[in-house]
Amino acid sequence: MRATWCEPYDSIMFQSYEPPESGQATADRVARLRELLARSGLDAFLVPHADEHMNEYLPPCGARLAWLTGFTGSAGLAVVARKAAALFVDGRYILQAPKQVDTKIFEVLQIPAAKLSDWIGKQLKPGSVLGFDPKLHAAPTIDVLTKELEAKRIKLKPLPRNLVDRVWGRARPRPPQGVVVPHPLEYAGKPAKEKLAELQATLKEDGQDAVALTAPDSIAWLFNIRGSDVAHNPVVLAFAIVPVSGKAELFIDAAKIGPEAKAHLAPLAKISEPVALERRLSALKQAGKRVRVSPGAAVWFTRKLSGGKARVIRAADPCVLPKARKNATEIEGARAAHKRDGAALARFLAWLDRQSETGEIDEIAAARQLETVRSETRALKEISFDTISGAGPNGAIVHYRVTTATNRKLKSGELYLVDSGAQYLDGTTDVTRTVSIGTPTREMQERFTLVLKGHVTIATARFPKGTRGVDLDPFARRALWEAGLDFDHGTGHGVGSYLSVHEGPQGIGKQAMVAIEPGMIISNEPGYYKTGGYGIRIENLVLVTEPKKVPGGERETMSFETLTLVPIDRRLVVAEMLSTAELDWLNAYHARVADIIGPELGPADRAWLEQATAAIVER
Amino acid sequence: MRATWCEPYDSIMFQSYEPPESGQATADRVARLRELLARSGLDAFLVPHADEHMNEYLPPCGARLAWLTGFTGSAGLAVVARKAAALFVDGRYILQAPKQVDTKIFEVLQIPAAKLSDWIGKQLKPGSVLGFDPKLHAAPTIDVLTKELEAKRIKLKPLPRNLVDRVWGRARPRPPQGVVVPHPLEYAGKPAKEKLAELQATLKEDGQDAVALTAPDSIAWLFNIRGSDVAHNPVVLAFAIVPVSGKAELFIDAAKIGPEAKAHLAPLAKISEPVALERRLSALKQAGKRVRVSPGAAVWFTRKLSGGKARVIRAADPCVLPKARKNATEIEGARAAHKRDGAALARFLAWLDRQSETGEIDEIAAARQLETVRSETRALKEISFDTISGAGPNGAIVHYRVTTATNRKLKSGELYLVDSGAQYLDGTTDVTRTVSIGTPTREMQERFTLVLKGHVTIATARFPKGTRGVDLDPFARRALWEAGLDFDHGTGHGVGSYLSVHEGPQGIGKQAMVAIEPGMIISNEPGYYKTGGYGIRIENLVLVTEPKKVPGGERETMSFETLTLVPIDRRLVVAEMLSTAELDWLNAYHARVADIIGPELGPADRAWLEQATAAIVER
């Protein structure tokens, strides 16, 4: 295949490389918001990074925080008072946020050191009223804040209409109109009818009259539908109410449902306009029903449903666990998706090795090339997130997103980190490789090998039932710890099946308290980041196997099947730092990659793959 | 030293081997309790394993649960209703409890599968009243139970006097009268005056007017005093109130304080009779004070202190963390205590090897011998818990306590597990060794070596600040998991300095969420238990070192110094199952034991030690 990195940037499909709009318009927008505060008799208003579904990716109409402040991070909350304003972000965004927002207007503060209620207590007098949009905050968050502010005699007031929306006015984008498509049984593996019946059996067992579903990926999974309402995650923005018996009700803009989706959904659910949701919740409340709502759902649901004899049961979304435990069809789909994706990655890495010698490739060109080889599979529906394409010091920025303003050449003697994924009908992928451009330093090799040891120690883990992600995370870190090093992110997150690339409840990390179960797909991605120098991350997706008894063992144990099939850069491996078992794993993994991916490649790429997966022989 | 195992049992010092009293008197006692229920207008009463201090070891007057039911486990709760009664225990005691109690009277149920509020809801009608002693239940427990029973319209009623005490009457033992002794500065390392000043600075920083201390080990640590009110832990049963400024007040029976203790305490605290505590708490409440109380303290304190303008701050006992972080003197003391204890253990193990050939030694004789060699140090103040002395299948019972009824010979071809500890003025020890009697089977050796691998992986860990016990626990299990094996207890617990052998907040285990800090002492005790076969446990105490940067590293990391100096049975080690690093650790550990302990022994024991610590050379 010919290199395409010299093509103009406007042929990009799924990723844009424009720098985000800076917050120039902020002053005017904040001023208008403050006028509204005054007119509404409020002293301040909360603007979170959140929508009605608590999505990770917001539709444009939900990007209120970015519109108001200019801050584009994936988590944050602004509070605008009559005179002062603040933006609260976590450690990931403490460098980015002050560059994006007007710090004369917004004081940027880092949680958890800085506390929202402390700032409010300092800025507002006792007796003040703080407005919020109950559709954008989870119930437990509001409960805690209410309690903290009570002590300061400040009242939290839910507003019927979001103040930012009123300022935004007609310029605010319309809700997304992504077309709903049925997700075929050959990929979903289980008819929606069966999923609904099992869900209703769960409700019956738990003594609940209905469940209100607010998470788009739960709804997409339950009804076997997919959409394109938000970037990268093929979910459908909708709400649903499933009663313990009888037909479910799906609240969704009818314009999004074509004839095919209509026929698919007809036997499963009554279709209603989103505006009907409020009436339906009120009716459940009037009837004194026990309705299950996820603690992560917006407090608006809890409020609409509780009172009188009615009772809200705050319990986990009942779709979350069955969705996380992939069925046999989804597992087969994941294997096929990874074979396809692995072949695309091999083509990309072979291209990279050939082209990087020119010294002319930059981060955007590489990301574009990766998207190109994936689209050439003719199966690519979307990329599963904006590719992290970081050369040299940019690789050390964990949440780096390349733009024309930050774009950097891939220089000889540096490392290049590329974290990317694809959405295929049969599965979602997510893979990170760290590639040596030219000759690496000994330090780069040693630290890469420490990260590799962590990766292999996770990949080869065997563990009993009940083991949680927190119980595996240390295996990814021990080799780094021994060298006085570490990385400041989790080791792994759950991944959906042609759904969200970040999917709970499982994960591998210090807060991952959920038991790992067979069929779950998790990322295994330890790293190391030298600020101003380079970044290293090695990420494969792994599948949790069925429990079995090993010979001589007493307890059933599970292990991981590595799904991702992409060479790990041998030029960065210090073989003598690996134990025999670790080296055996690497060689066996590479042999498997060569076996499965090799036949998918043309002669030149296959030759590249052969040397890239050749066994390392210990001296 | 001559063997003493053939001496009569009545020369025992700190441990009794009598089987516990069975619950024969139960019927009469329960009948009288039910009469009281009827007369008091109550429908049921709660009898927990707990005293006013939430001690692990109860004084005889606090052993209400054992007196009423016959159950002697270290955790449990009985509920006696007019017609029915139940005893709730955890998995550790589900075999023992039905043997000890009259199951015609008490239904024995296992938590968490069985739930107290469910049982109560089934036995009591709506409108019923359940009595409890507010001095014996932690506040959060009562909060949760109140909420659960509200839904069933059952009321919880605190009683001014414990109903079991009323039945027990004059036969109930008097509160313990252990004499208070000052703990010399040469062992404590910091004057009580300084500890009090630092505590008051903490209260000031946290904006609290006073703290109510209810944990005996906190009080013993804070005032540098020790006592003998409960078995094995040299604590003083007392309460204390420390105001943010001014003199502390200690509530304690004056009869326990001799002239020396009086002189020691005079500058530190006003001494008051325990009966004055209630009045003092009421005064704090009347004055509207903000008083800090541990969430683990009895709900009685919260109730006495809250209301009006007064506010109870439920926050961790402020002595707990400084007590856990041993100072330089305590650390030196710990090293000295372990040298002394290690020498005693070496004498014991040498004796065991010589005597076990006779086939005549039993579990009690061995435990008695161990107590004898420790008392011969002339420094032994107490054993730190009842020695677990388990031969063959008894070794597989994790909480085994040998009695004349269960006593078993140490037979050739079996394993012997001995878990014991000592209280010395300079430190508390806790050590477990598993010894091969005669020739072990290959399976025993292999599983011992798997446990040893876990032990070494903990002993050699290096980890950054913020690492919690939960982040180390998996290292103790990985080798067992790979073989399909595991153990069902935590890997380690905190240990006091001439104080409790179980001391929080740190630990190593699945629920150990507290950051490990320099100066903490923790046990490292992975195990393996083959029910009906044998038990394996290897336990050393380790000290957390000061953080430092290793060469080439970026972050400060801590590690463990192993304090315990006792040979690990080489006959049970399969050298080829160990990595080079693991074998190196074992050989270096044994060399250190020989160096430090050897000079403390006579010629015969020294000869034994030499072969017991000889390096294992890999073939």
Image (tube, coloured by chain):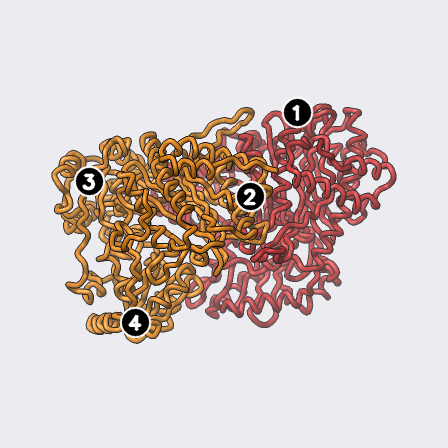
Chain colours: A red, B orange
The secondary element bearing badge 1 is classed as: helix
Seen in the image, is B348 located left or right of residue B29?
right
Q: Residue at x 64, y 50 (%)?
A: A560
> Is residue A179 depicted above or below A94 in this figure?
below
The residue tagged 2 is A473
Q: Distance of mark 1 from mark 2, alpha carbons? A: 27 Å
Residue receiving disc 1: A442
| Residues packed near mark 2 inside 10 Å, few (<14), some (14 to 19) or many (20 plus) | many
CA gap between label 4 and label 2 equals: 47 Å
Q: In the shown orientation, is residue A142 left or right of residue A582?
A: left
Label 3 lies in what chain?
B
Residue corresponding to mark 4 = B81
Q: Say which label, 1 or 2, has the lower sequence index.
A: 1
Q: For this view, does B485 lie left or right of residue B142?
A: right
Q: Position of residue A588 (x, y in %)?
A: 73, 43
Cα–Cα gap, marks 4 and 3? 44 Å
Q: Amino acid at mark 2?
A: Asp
Q: Amino acid at mark 3?
A: Val
Determine the residue located farthest toward the right in the rendered image: A603
Pick the residue in front: A35 or A369.
A369
Residue that carries the numbered disc 3 in the rendered image: B181
> Distance of mark 2 from mark 3, alpha carbons?
47 Å
- Where disc 2 sits, the SS reads helix
Q: Same chain for the residues at labels 1 and 3, yes or no? A: no
> Sequence order check: which comes first, mark 4 or mark 3?
4
Q: Amino acid at mark 4?
A: Ala
